[in-house]
């Protein structure tokens, strides 16, 4: 069953272009992770100021395995702050 993780990122004013540039530079860095199905970076419009990163995984176990292997970023090198992760399972609707 596909699981979806949505990370809400607050980005200081003036750092949006840098955030997008960094995501573009590592666009395919997760492609080879077992169970990874894809991601999207959503730019805010309207009243919201936060970005959202949506990732899809074949299972919760696949996501957890990838998350457990991530290397923490060095302090002072980030341009965003995670404001929390929303977690979902995709509902397979029958005809």
Image (spheres, helix red, strand yellow):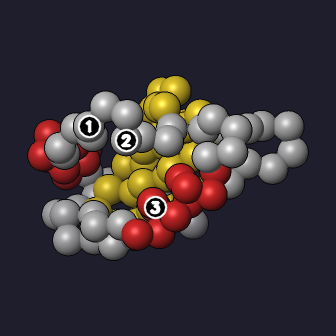
Disc 1: which residue: 74
Which corner quadrant of the image does residue 68 belong to?
A: top left
Of the two numbered discs 1 and 3 on the same chain, state the one appearing first in sequence. 3
Of the two numbered discs 2 and 3 on the same chain, state the one appearing first in sequence. 3
- Between the C-alphas of marks 2 and 3, the distance is 14 Å
**Residue at 81% over, 50% down:** 45
**Residue at 27% over, 40% down:** 73
- Between the C-alphas of marks 2 and 1, the distance is 6 Å
Disc 2: which residue: 77
Q: Closest to the observer: 53 or 3?
A: 53
Q: Which residue is most to the top?
A: 83
- Between the C-alphas of marks 1 and 3, the distance is 17 Å
Is 56 placed left or right of 66 in the picture?
Answer: right
Reply above or below: 22 against 78: below
**x and y percentages locating residue 61 in the rendered image:** 18, 45
**x and y percentages locating residue 90 in the rendered image:** 46, 51
User: Mark 2 touching mark 1, by CB under 8 A?
Assistant: yes
**Residue at 33% over, 72% down:** 28
**Residue at 32% over, 56% down:** 57
Disc 3: which residue: 23
């Amino acid at each position: 069953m596909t699981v979806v993780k949505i990370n809400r990122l607050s980005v200081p004013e003036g750092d949006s272009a840098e955030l997008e540039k960094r995501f573009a530079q590592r666009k395919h860095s997760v492609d080879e992770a077992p169970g990874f199905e894809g991601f999207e970076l959503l730019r805010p419009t309207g009243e919201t100021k936060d970005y959202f990163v949506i990732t899809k995984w074949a299972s919760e176990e696949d996501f957890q395995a990838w998350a457990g292997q991530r290397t923490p970023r060095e302090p002072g090198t980030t341009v965003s702050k995670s404001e929390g992760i929303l977690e979902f399972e995709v509902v397979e609707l029958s005809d």
